[in-house]
Amino acid sequence: MLRAAGRHLGSLAGRDLAARCAEGRLDAKGRAASRAARKRALTAESSSRWAGAITRTSEDQWRLAEQNLHAWKSNLTARIGRIEVRLAVPAGGRAGRTRGYGTAAERHAKSIRLQWLKVRLARVERQLEAGSVSVVRGGRTLLRKRGNLAAAGLTEERWRAEWESARLFLTADGGKDKVWGNETIRWNPDEGWLEVKLPDPLVALANRPHGRYRLSCPVEFSYRGDEVAAQAVTGAVRYDISHDPARDRWYLDASWKITPVPAVSLDDLRQHPVVAVDMNHGHLAVAVVAPDGNILGAPATIGLDLAGRPATARDGRLRAAVTTLIGTAREHGARAVVIENLDFAAARAEGRERDGSRPSRGRRGRAFRRLVSGIPTGRFRDRLAQMAARAGLSVIVVDPAYTSRWGVEHWLGSLREHHPKATGHHAAALVTGRRGLGHRARRRATGNRSAPEEAARPAQARLWTQARQTAPRKPAAPPGPRQPSGAKTGRPHRTTVGNQAAQDRSGPPIARTMSC
């Protein structure tokens, strides 16, 4: 029954999505009129609620496809800009801080790649201008596997089963005034049965009144079932039924909106301990920081092995890591989790075209890009915000500048005196927590607490608003071999912004006898 209903509704969803994509970009009034017309056409072959879910899903898929086109345009623009900047410099040369390509052959290959990228950018711009997007029901990745089943490790029958399961449509939006929170798909948490309102052409299969079909097997939620039951009694619940052809099992997913709560003030959160997190490739370094800026207990490491895992497994491991963080916060009475405002969007957009301080070519470049792609900064931040809000915790985001450097310089030694297994990542987490509490990232020789006048405002605001030093510049690097020792030139050496910042940066404290 589920397969028959899913196929019928899936065919309607595919036809509606094709009609929506053919209409192109619409304004708010045009979208409302288009959805109303398409919903009327679908209601005769299903029901009003099934038609509403289908048209809503089609609109969401169109918007997501348009967002992907804009993201792809930004990616191509960044790559083209980086190549053009480096092509302006002769091969093997340098213009300021921009380095040209190493050889003439590499420069020629990049010029060819530039033309190819411009062709793709022009194609994307034409699509955006015309409002034309492409959406594959079932997934483009699965569709491409059909062309080479041997490389994908699938047979034609296995691929066909996955393709048909991915194109089923069994999604029902909830209603807060309906019985058990949904009129189309109902789940009874007390008795464990599931009923589905069949579309009109399949009403003959119903075994319950009013065209409903009740499954003979019991249905239960193995994760957060009590929350689903509470929501089904008091509010709307959306249900999604999916099929896994590999295991030949059917799954029911429930989702609902959470009522937003007022945000807690930063001053109130700083009166309690915080859980600071330093995200790295393959693990999270965690430190619980007290309101005075000292560490509580021993730092911990949470494994986060996501390489080569499917999307569902990666999401499950992220949720497990966040659950561990929430448990740590409750154990120490913390009311907030502090993370760094990391964003590798530029690194991912420019990819191998990027040069400068980070590797872009060869083995080191590939290793760096693999490292960046393996750190799920955006997904971790979103998942943490969602789960922390349900647990009554807040999330504080701080500036990530120099957390690792200052953590090793000022805190790693003291950490290892009490916790010999502490690493530089744990020291960076401590610095992150101190910034979230409004303390200085670096230690003072006269004490661990901030000065009263500095504690009155956030540390990052103080760093950005600090007045420039009026002291004369220090001399640049010592003369090279071309200038004999003791000789003076009429023009001083050029001092760049980078080494000037290194000269003005304060060094490690003189006294290191303060306890952590």
Image: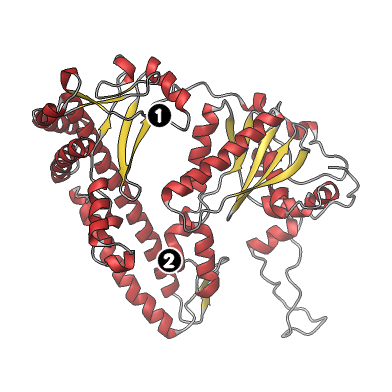
Amino acid type for the residue under numbered disc 1:
Glu
Residue 508: horizontal and vertical position, in percent? 81, 54
Q: What kind of element bears circle 1? A: loop
Of badges 2 and 1, the one in the foreground is: 1
Q: Is residue 51 left or right of residue 90?
A: left
- Comparing 293 with 176, the one in front is 176
- Comparing 474 with 146, the one in front is 146
294 above or below 214? below
Residue 376: horizontal and vertical position, in percent? 50, 50
- Comparing 283 with 75, the one in front is 283
84 above or below 127? below
Looking at the rendering, which quadrant does residue 118 occupy? bottom left
Q: What kind of element bears circle 2? A: helix
Residue 462 appears in the picture as rendered: no
Q: Is residue 403 left or right of residue 443?
A: left
The local crowd at label 2, few if under 14, some if 14 to 19, many if 20 or more residues have their Cα within 10 Å, is some
What's the residue at 53%, 76% (across, down)?
A: 94
Q: Which colour scheme is used?
A: secondary structure
The local crowd at label 1, few if under 14, some if 14 to 19, many if 20 or more residues have their Cα within 10 Å, is some
CA distance separating discs 2 and 1? 53 Å
Amino acid type for the residue under numbered disc 2:
Arg
Q: In this view, does 209 lie to the left or right of 277?
A: left
Residue under numbered circle 2: 82
Residue 460: horizontal and vertical position, in percent? 65, 41
From the image, which quarter does the N terminus lie in? top left
Residue 302: horizontal and vertical position, in percent? 63, 47
Q: How many marks?
A: 2
What's the residue at 35%, 47% (across, down)?
A: 247
Residue 220, numbered circle: 1
Residue 155 appears in the picture as rendered: yes
What's the residue at 35%, 76% (across, down)?
A: 111
